[in-house]
Image: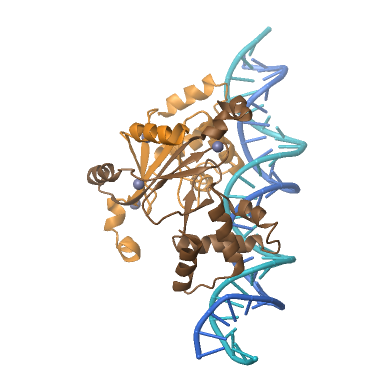
Chain colours: A brown, B orange, C blue, D cyan
Amino acid sequence: MTGREIAATLKRRGYKLTCQRRAIIDVLSASGKHLTSADIYARLKDEHPGIGLVTVYRTLELLQESGLLCEVHIGDSCRSYLNKKADVHHHHLICSGCGKVVDFTGCELDKLQERLAAETGFKIDNHLLQFMGRCSKCLASKECQSCQS
Amino acid sequence: MTGREIAATLKRRGYKLTCQRRAIIDVLSASGKHLTSADIYARLKDEHPGIGLVTVYRTLELLQESGLLCEVHIGDSCRSYLNKKADVHHHHLICSGCGKVVDFTGCELDKLQERLAAETGFKIDNHLLQFMGRCSKCLASKECQSCQS
DNA sequence: CACCTAAATGAAAATGATTTTCATTTATAA
DNA sequence: TTATAAATGAAAATCATTTTCATTTAGGTG
Ligand SMILES: [Zn+2]
Ligand SMILES: [Zn+2]
Ligand SMILES: [Zn+2]
Ligand SMILES: [Zn+2]
């Protein structure tokens, strides 16, 4: 989603388009990595000191509720976020070295989902799928080779 | 895995089999739900007051490292744990109403994983998959029907 | 069985992340 | 421009997790 689309969605939902929110959205869009609140806060420091960490938290919650960003689940830190490129069903491939995220579509989990629903009596309404690994850049770098293949 | 198997693994790894650890393992085995440290601590209170929350944390970390339990990722609370029934590749179907978890095998994500690796240059080493929904019990209960179908 | 020792425990303090509170500022509509 | 509700930032409060350290204990040894 473009900054423009995001701005439109916020307006439609009755939220104000503040420069803090714009800045946070920009940081997310500019990064190909998953970022925590603290990461985003750190990246704002140069251009927008003055923006408080609280505002980052609040903005992320807002964007999340509005379905404007993706969430990523890594080992310990549950809460890292990602710019949602388009509003289609997709999942993420995540580099555990540098945090880079590649989106992909075509999970084809519907059949499995149906089978499970039938077998268990659950009404399944969504699924979480992620692949974890190392990107080519991290594979090539010396440091990563030494620490864990 | 049975309590017996778990105990054996701990011994093999040079850890002591304390009654606190036994109690925590029992709570996990007895529950068909995913539990946080605090959940486990609460369930210990009756039979084993005296066991400290710190010990729960430490024991979970230990069991985790030894591959004796499963982790589950839900919305906010990232860290909840689950008894690992068997040491085979499987995933979880989770009830968002009551926390009940059903294991399943046969994810068949290898082809997708290969395709992604080829397309992106990533070396993929694992994946996370979970289905979320409501179990039949929760579907039937009045409260759940009123709050969210 | 009694003894020894490293490992494990619990209480309290420390840390870190997230949320709440509240006075001040600001985007937006009239 | 003005009015107003929404948004912000600083500080305090809360909650989860980890560290510290003195004490206890499991499990091996004689
Ligand atoms: Zn990388
Ligand atoms: Zn999917
Ligand atoms: Zn349920
Ligand atoms: Zn799988």
**Quadrant in the rendering for residue B126:** top left
Q: How many marks?
A: 0
Vertical order, D26 against C14 (above or below): above
Q: Residue A51 vs residue A118: left or right?
A: right
**Relative depth, front residue between C3 and A117:** A117
Horizontal and vertical percent position of residue B144: 33, 61
Vertical order, A65 against A34 (above or below): below
User: Which image quarter is the N terminus of chain B in?
Assistant: top left
Horizontal and vertical percent position of residue B113: 39, 34
Horizontal and vertical percent position of residue C24: 71, 77
Q: Is residue B90 visible?
A: no
Q: Name the residue at 62% across, 27% down.
A: A142
Horizontal and vertical percent position of residue B74: 45, 49
Q: Name the residue at 67% across, 62% down.
A: A52
User: Extreme left residue here?
Assistant: A118
**Relative depth, front residue between D24 and C23:** C23
Q: Residue A5 vs residue A35: left or right?
A: left
Q: Is residue B104 visible?
A: yes
The quadrant where ligand 1 appears is top right
Q: Name the residue at 58% across, 39% down.
A: A98
User: Which image quarter is the C terminus of chain B in?
Assistant: bottom left
Q: Name the residue at 35% across, 31% down.
A: B110
Vertical order, C7 against B116 (above or below): above
